[in-house]
Amino acid sequence: MGLKRMILSLALVPFFTACGDLNASIDNVEVTLKDDEVLMGDMIVKRDKLIDPRDEEEEFSVILEEDVDEEDSVNSSGTSARSSNLWNNGTIRYRFGSSISSNEKTRFLNMCAELGAYANVRCRPKRSGDKDFIQIKTTNNPDVCGLSHLGRMGGKQELLISRSCWFDRSTIKHELMHAFGVSHEQAHFDRNDYLKINWDNIHDEYKYAFFKLRQDEVRKHTHFDRNSIMLYHSWAFSKNNKPTMVLRGETGDRRLIYKNYEMSKKDHNILVKLYGGTSPF
């Protein structure tokens, strides 16, 4: 099975899932991927950002069938050798799908406005001349919560919020953070300094959700944040209700990570560093 298909089979499970039926069908969710894109957890990333799991210090059984082309991966600054994935002027151009209700539209715009509390980021409707924009979609599938591309990919891209998750402010903000270019805390290249991944506790088909990304713009501006809205909790994708991820350097219950429902100051500061604005510190 190729990389794209394997990741597609796991990516749409809610990012906050602690337990339950993780094998439920997602066949009725349509996601468009370009040739150089792959799904990783609830975010779509450029293929050259993904670190081959055989480079990990931990051992586990999942093996990729395709390798990343090292010559097209990282430049001397430590960022992707391809063009920046930030949005021009910090502005996401969006278009709502026909199935998005007026209340959902309002909630989306309110959450986007909250992301702009300190940073120079905003959302505005797509105009006729906009080539890069986000199509906002929804689904009635209860096993899907959110999905977004990581930053501006070029052309049309998608952001999905499940009908059952529009009530959750953290889900909308989490996916918007992805859209503005912010990845998961546990996906950063230096995450092994702060987190221990318990591979034996993760469903084999969901281990892709814990792969790492190559050095990126975000990590140049901040350090690990246990209070980030972009951090999975300790039981995400667990096959046995045991922690899949714990904090290093802590003991007892302090090793455990719980779902963060609001953006931390560091979350806001990341957006400020990427797009400008006033730091919350």
Image (cartoon, helix red, strand yellow):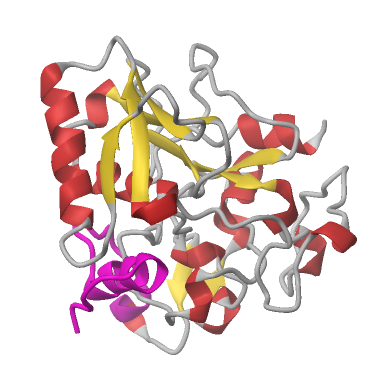
* Residue at 41% across, 68% down: 274
Above or below for 118 versus 175: below
Above or below for 115 versus 147: below
Residue 229 figure quarter: bottom left
Q: Nearer the viewer, residue 127 or 193?
A: 127
Q: Is residue 60 magenta?
A: no
Residue that lies at the very extreme toward the front in this rendered image: 129
* x then y, percent, for residue 71: 89, 62
Which range of residues does the magenta coloring cover?
Answer: 253-281
Above or below for 177 versus 274: above
* x then y, percent, for residue 233: 37, 59
Q: Nearer the viewer, residue 73 or 245?
A: 73
Task: Say whether residue 165 is left or right of residue 210.
Answer: left
Q: Is residue 270 magenta?
A: yes
Q: Nearer the viewer, residue 132 or 215?
A: 132
Task: Say whether residue 253 is left or right of residue 179.
Answer: left
Residue that lies at the very extreme toward the bottom in this rendered image: 249
Above or below for 124 versus 183: above
Observer able to see residue 107: yes
Q: Image quadrant for the C terminus?
A: bottom left
* Residue at 37% across, 55% down: 89
* x then y, percent, for residue 267: 30, 68
Task: Say whether residue 58 is left or right of residue 202.
Answer: right
* x then y, percent, for residue 252: 34, 81
- Could you tell me how many numbered marks the image carries? 0
Task: Say whether residue 97 is left or right of residue 85.
Answer: left
